[in-house]
Amino acid sequence: MKKNYIFTNKEHPKKSIMSTILGTLSVASLILAAYLSYMDKGAENMRYGSACFLAMIFAFVGVVLGVLGRMEKEKFYLFSYIGIVLNLAAIGLVSLILYAGALL
């Protein structure tokens, strides 16, 4: 019985890993800001607004980094895809929060 081993020098792009980290921070801070605002009975707080604004900036930067990491050749792309999805979800959450705020 012959064993086949495949050795590769592929690695995850650092841009993609940073994109995933930024996406995780963005989604977590948006969920936390929405939860804390709910616990304050919908009171407007500048801290929550600034956290959402920074999360939106992080999400846009994360999408760019995820796409740049995906464009690199001979790399693994798992973190690129995860980063892009998380950052697009964060942008969607900000859009949902703004849309819900406009209706109320």
Image (cartoon, rainbow, N blue to C red):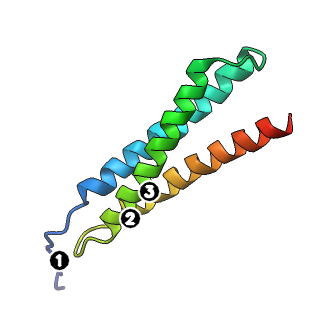
Binning the other alpha carbons within 10 Å of mark 1 as few (below 14), some (14 to 19) or many (20 upward) gives few
Q: Position of residue 40 (x, y in %)?
A: 72, 14
Question: In the image, is residue 67 above or below residue 33?
Answer: below
Whether residues under marks 3 and 2 lie with C-beta atoms below 8 angstroms apart, the answer is yes
Whole-number angstrom distance, CA of label 3 to CA of label 2: 6 Å
Q: Judging from the image, what secondary structure is the residue with disc 2 in? A: helix
Q: Judging from the image, what secondary structure is the residue with disc 1 in? A: loop
Residue shown at 38% from the left, 43% from the top? 21
The three-letter amino acid code for the residue at tag 3 is: Val
The three-letter amino acid code for the residue at tag 1 is: Ile
Question: In the image, is residue 38 above or below residue 75?
Answer: above
Q: Earlier in the sequence, mark 2 or mark 1?
A: 1
Q: Which mark is residue 63?
A: 3
Residue shown at 64% from the left, 45% from the top? 93
Mark 1 lies on residue? 6
- The image quadrant that residue 10 belongs to is bottom left
Residue shown at 58% from the left, 49% from the top? 91
> Residue extending furthest right?
104
Residue shown at 25% from the left, 60% from the top? 12
Question: In the image, is residue 74 above or below residue 31?
Answer: below
Mark 2 lies on residue? 67
Give the mark count: 3
Whole-number angstrom distance, CA of label 1 to CA of label 3: 32 Å
Q: Position of residue 18 (x, y in %)?
A: 32, 48
Whole-number angstrom distance, CA of label 2 to CA of label 1: 28 Å
The three-letter amino acid code for the residue at tag 2 is: Val
Q: Quadrant of the N terminus?
A: bottom left
Q: Position of residue 76 (x, y in %)?
A: 29, 67
Q: Position of residue 4 (x, y in %)?
A: 18, 81
Binning the other alpha carbons within 10 Å of mark 2 as few (below 14), some (14 to 19) or many (20 upward) gives some
Q: Is residue 18 left or right of residue 52?
A: left
Q: Judging from the image, what secondary structure is the residue with disc 3 in? A: helix
